[in-house]
Amino acid sequence: MTLFLFDLDGTLTPPRLKMTKEFEDFFVSWAKNKKSFIVTGSDFKKVTEQLSLEVMNVFEGIYCSMGNVLWQKGRFVYKNEFKADEKLLKMLENYRASTSYPYQLFDNYIEKRDGMINFSVLGRDCPYEERIKYFEFDKEHCEREKIKNELSETFKEYDISIGGMISMDITPKGYGKEQVAEKLRAKFPAEKIIFFGDKTFEGGNDYTLAQAVLKSGNSSVVQVSGPDVTKEFLLTNGD
Ligand code: M1P
């Protein structure tokens, strides 16, 4: 049986928004008798904001916080601990203080999650319109890319990847989404694996998982640009 792995934001739902009713109806019916998993950078609370109980229950496992937390059918299974370096936190504070972003900033800009940190210069407690405003600014000025590159140079012991619209995910090396491929391969040595993500390219937060899945053999990766493309693929090739 094929294992289907899905990123969440930008793959099954629009970034940080609820799954649409239309997609939900399609997906719940498609997922019957299939083995599906979510692998997201978000924490479990955000997943519960975006997915109904019915949808969450069709998954064999929901790997959150870049694979550092696992929930199965409403049951907490494990989490990895992580305490960030003071020097890293200080540098994040400096990026926030010195940004050239000309509009309002919001709270919760360093979000400590189990096993990782999510950093957003804008601040996670922003309204949706502000996140779009920052996203447009970032497309033009590549602020996240610059910060990511500088941090990666300074902190070789961390992996930094850009997911979503306003933030970046920071994990200890080897504790990004790629850890999920290893765990699933150990449990399902021969099954075909297909991974769907919207950021499977280098630097994106699906990249390391995409690479690990491909390396594990009998697998493929599908780069999507949103839930519609995911749906189209599942309708035409989804076994
Ligand atoms: O799942 C993708 C990303 O979704 C959110 O990103 P943003 O708020 O920047 O749109 C975050 O939860 C992030 O951790 C996650 O990787």
Image (cartoon, grey):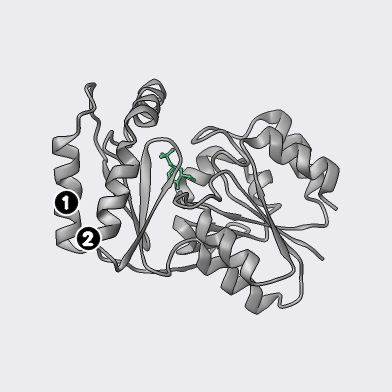
Q: Which residue is mark 2?
A: 154
Question: How far apart, in angstroms, are the residues tagged by discs 2 and 1?
Answer: 10 Å
Q: In the image, 126: left or right of 224?
A: left
Q: Residue 195 location in percent, x, y?
A: 66, 55
**Which image quarter: residue 163?**
top left
Q: Residue 196 location in percent, x, y?
A: 65, 50
**Badge nearest the viewer, 2 or 1:** 2
Kindly state the secondary structure of the residue where label 2 is placed. helix
Q: Are marks 2 and 1 in contact (CB under 8 Å)?
A: yes
Vertical position of residue 182 compared to residue 194: above or below? below
**Other-residue count near label 1 (Cα within 10 Å), few / some / many at <14 / 14–19 / ≥20:** few
Nearer the observer, 40 or 70: 40
Which quadrant, please, contains the N terminus? Answer: bottom right
**Disc number placed over residue 227 in the picture, else none:** none
Q: In the image, 184: left or right of 203?
A: right
Q: Give amino acid for label 2.
A: Thr
Nearer the observer, 62 or 215: 215
**Which image quarter: residue 153?**
bottom left
Q: Residue 226 location in percent, x, y?
A: 62, 35
Q: Which residue is mark 1?
A: 91
Name the residue located 57 percent from the left edge and 45 percent from the top edge: 8
Q: Give amino acid for label 1.
A: Met
Ligand 1's image quarter is top left
Nearer the observer, 96 or 200: 200
Name the residue located 29 percent from the left edge and 43 percent from the top edge: 146
